[in-house]
Amino acid sequence: MLRKLFKFHGGVKPQTNKTESTTAPIGQVPLPDRLVIPLHQAVGGHPRPLVAPGDKVFKGQRIGGADGNLSSAVHASTSGIVRDVAPALMPHTSGLEALSVIIEPDGDDAWGQLDTINFRSAPPDEVRDYLRDAGVVGLGGAVFPSYAKLKPGKEGRLKTLVINGAECEPFITCDDLLMRERAPEMLKGIIAMRHMLQAEEVLIGIEDNKPEAVAAVQAAIAASGETGIEAVAIPTRYPAGGAKQLIRVLTGIEVPHGRRSTDFGVQCFNVGTAFSIYEALEFGRPLISRVVTVAGNVNAPRNYDVLIGTPMDHLVRLAGPRADTDRYIMGGPMMGVRLPRFDVPVVKATNCILVGSAALFPAPAPEMPCIRCGECAKACPADLAPFEMYWFSRAKNFGKAQEYHLFDCIECGCCSFVCPSHIPLVDYFRFSKSEIWAREREKEAADAARDRFEFKNYRQEREKQEKAEKLAAKAAATREKVAAEGAAPAADAPSAPAAKPKPSVDPAKLALIEAAMEKARQQKAQAAPKNTEVAAPEIKAEMAAIDARREAAGADKPADAPPASGA
Amino acid sequence: MLTALLVMTGIALVLGALLGFASIKFKVEGDPLVDKIDAILPQTQCGQCGFPGCRPYATAIAGGEAEINQCPPGGEEGIRKLADLLGREFKPLSEEHGVEKPKSVAVIDEQTCIGCTLCIQACPVDAIVGAAKQLHTIIASECTGCELCLAPCPVDCIVMEPIAETVDTWKWRYPVFEIKAAA
Amino acid sequence: MINSPFVRKSASVQQVMLKVLLALVPGIAAYVWFFGAGILVQLAIASAAALAGEAAMLAIRGKPKAIFLTDLSAIVTAWLIALTFPPIVPWWLTVTGTLLAVVVVKQLYGGLGQNPFNPAMAAFCLMIVAYPALMSQWPAAGQLDFGTQLKLIFGGLRDVDAITGATPLDALRTALRGATNPDSPFHGLRASQLQDGPAFGMMGGKGGEWVALGYLVGGLWLIQQRIITWHIPAAFCGALFVVAGLMWGLHPDGFASPLFHLASGGAMIGAFFILTDPVSGATTARGKLLFAAGAAVLTFVIRAFGAYPDGVAFATLLMNILVPIIDMKTQAPVFGHKKD
């Protein structure tokens, strides 16, 4: 059956460079001397550390607990000793550190206790919590916690589950190899996801430059006997593997920025994610390793099954980096992240380590002014006008840049790729976006501070007023009291010599002071327990005995003591 | 001639009536200018401008009683925004009101704190918790970095620490225009 | 620091400009064939002046020279000036026009990519206002040999009326206006009769239609090369054809045929090479259609009712003014925000 496919606007066709790394099967990596496992590897809240330096951990033991609404757990990739829980350099362009667990492997690679779950019988919420604690996140690069995406929309069911095996970035072949070698397992993961989402049909989109993967997946589907699952070869055009673009190609649906795709009856997962869901559900193995392509400036480009936390240089050494290597890039050449150092760890987002050199990725020619030729707009898969956004980003006119839909930009790099003026357009958009986010954070903080300041002022004002009111009320009450019972003393007053010495003092005030002192005297008198008269004689006797004992101990100050009981 | 005069007078009357009606119909409550200025100010509530908080300063600016360059936390960018909003000339930050510093939060040295509550009273945004003779601590996320708690502390146990950049708050830098270097 | 993407298509401003220059070659070849090699001299003069002006301005503005002088954008401007000016204007007029275009209209506005007006057309308008007589002398095909052309360009030979005729457009205008004027020798003539006269070829003036055809061929190649899109040429030609056809259909004796309008004057070079200048033109698909159609209507109005024989230059400038608002109002909906 030939399925009707749709087209997305724009896109480019960079040289794919994929064949070299697909000749050898997925390789194994010897255990490194130490693993650096960052706690925050997925979108969402920062997991809190569950281990301390010196702890012994098993393979698959949870070392970072999910925290907050959207967060995903992190696990020890092998058994060993926790050497430190400290900030370590991240595989991130910023060159900043983040809290990581550093494990020294003991070489046993021993699994801890593994619990499995039956996704068919267990309540969906439990399965989701299970996957959250198994640390399963999107392995296509976005590392969005998968459990949060495994909820069907409002209707409780989904029309299409899209599985992303397009892998459009040049050099990267990890999904290709995974589909070739592990299609049946991956398919089981897909079936579980389909069950959770109650999806009518499943479309596995694979770019047509991977015929072996298409064949392997089709064979697995045929062998499983499942219906409604189809492997679809789609035209090779970057970025066909972008989730939005793939959904568009397979279903014709365009999911707008900021909307949930389930609202449109679609959900999209990466093939690697499907495999790790299978591992988690079938064997209880959390996400502790992934397939990583090592390609670029190496003698033997290849895919490896890599433990999360493995230092990248340890891995790259296996592929034989060439002498002129000057950088590692995490991801592909179009969207990859320039890394600060060679020894940063492999994380869940690492689909490829692209080894670079000045010869392989030469610096672009100098940036020229924009001539508004519109090439970028022709290439943009989000139908944007990058040259307009560039103009406003360059001028730091962020409001205008947003009017031209800056946040619909998926940073695929097509515009920079085609620009005849060699303008780093995506860099401008990344700059603008992070400035806008920073400003929003600042604005939120400022608004909160304003609220708190205003509340403090209001509170102080209120307290002052309440105090004044209390005093006024008290004064009025006392005045009344004095006026009522004081008719006689007031009459006596002129004859009383004590009241005379300070005639300037207001008699009313004097009466107030007098009343206050009287009140204090009364309070002192009251401090003695008053509720004892209702007590029975034997209790009275007991109390007397206690009092006597206390007095004997010399610890008693009955006047200061609170009333004996709250009766 | 007479008709022209009449027509002009008529137009004037009609327009005048329209304007008068509009001013009643579209009367704006409060002072939106003060709100707009207040929205630009950083809400540090530090009082470095010489006014007891950001809003009083905003009111003073709107009333023409204060310059736009008296807010060190808002910095140059804040002054530019105020200049744009008010159509005034940009001025560098006035030195007598302070200098622009990196954004910081106050931290209490727990070894030294004697629990006097003086800082709690000084904090304009209630970001310090604690009670008499109890150790005080600062809620970092609420602290505006105004430094108002530094002076009252009798044992000088509060220090300002600049907020470090993290992977989450890291910002992409402005792309460098490389054309000159290349030539 | 270099960030992703780390790979780039081999494309450059220089390549784009070079393709535009190449696309002009068929038109230039036809020009030389029918009107003589004088145009080549004009192209050389304009190119030299453009490079000199550009170099001087770059030096004054402290911009790198090598990269901007080799981007070929100044040469494109120079060629368009030479090809739209009459081929026998004196050399100083070509130089002045080119310098105005490069120095004032382009560099003073910020150089490459910053000019709101098409430099070549701005220069054309300035020159035709300043030197209306010199800018209106068009030799007929085969009328002048190369020597005479050189003498006209460099020497003082300026016996204008003896050697040149008006352009077909100009002649037509004079004739059609005269047709309704009882004192004119053209009184009672019809447009169709005029066009059968010796100064007119099959469509747009003898030889002129072949040059136009050359531009058309080059322009189509540019579309095939994805340097320009079909929108502007199609909308310009379409709108010009429709407007001219409408008027001609209503009043065949008072207006020239739509084909004549398309093939004469600056219509073809305008449609494919001038209005398509991305810097000063509209950029959205709908904007391009609007921009070019507007230019076509203005061109027709200026040709039929204005004081100048051809209207492409003025129409281009007028539409250049409208580009920002056209672009702003014609932004296409983005991914996920389209209405089905």
Image (tube, rainbow, N blue to C red):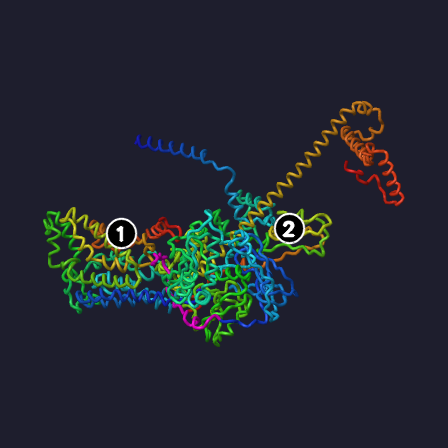
Q: Which-is-in-front pick, marks 1 and 2?
A: 1
Per the image, the residue denoted by label 1 is C293
Pinpoint residue B96: horizontal percent, then vertical percent. 59, 52
Residue at disc 1, secondary structure: helix
Question: In this orientation, which residue lies closer to the viewer: A130 or A464?
Answer: A130
Q: Is residue C95 above or below residue B129?
A: below
Q: Nearer the viewer, residue B139 or C97?
A: B139
Q: Which mark is residue A454?
A: none
Identify the subunit bearing mark 1. C
Amino acid bearing label 2: Leu
Residue under the point 12% across and 47% down: C181
Badge 2 density bin: few <14, some 14–19, many ≥20, Cα 10 Å = some
Q: What chain does mark 2 sit on?
A: B
The residue that label 2 is drawn on is B148
Callout 1 crowding tier (Cα within 10 Å): few <14, some 14–19, many ≥20: many
Q: Magenta residues, as a range?
A: A1-26
In this view, the residue farthest toward the bottom is A323
Quick check: can you spot residue B161? yes
Query: In the figure, is residue B83 to the left or right of A106?
Result: left
Q: Position of residue A399 (x, y in %)?
A: 45, 51
| Front-lying residue, A410 or A272 | A272
Would you say residue B56 sits in the magenta stretch? no
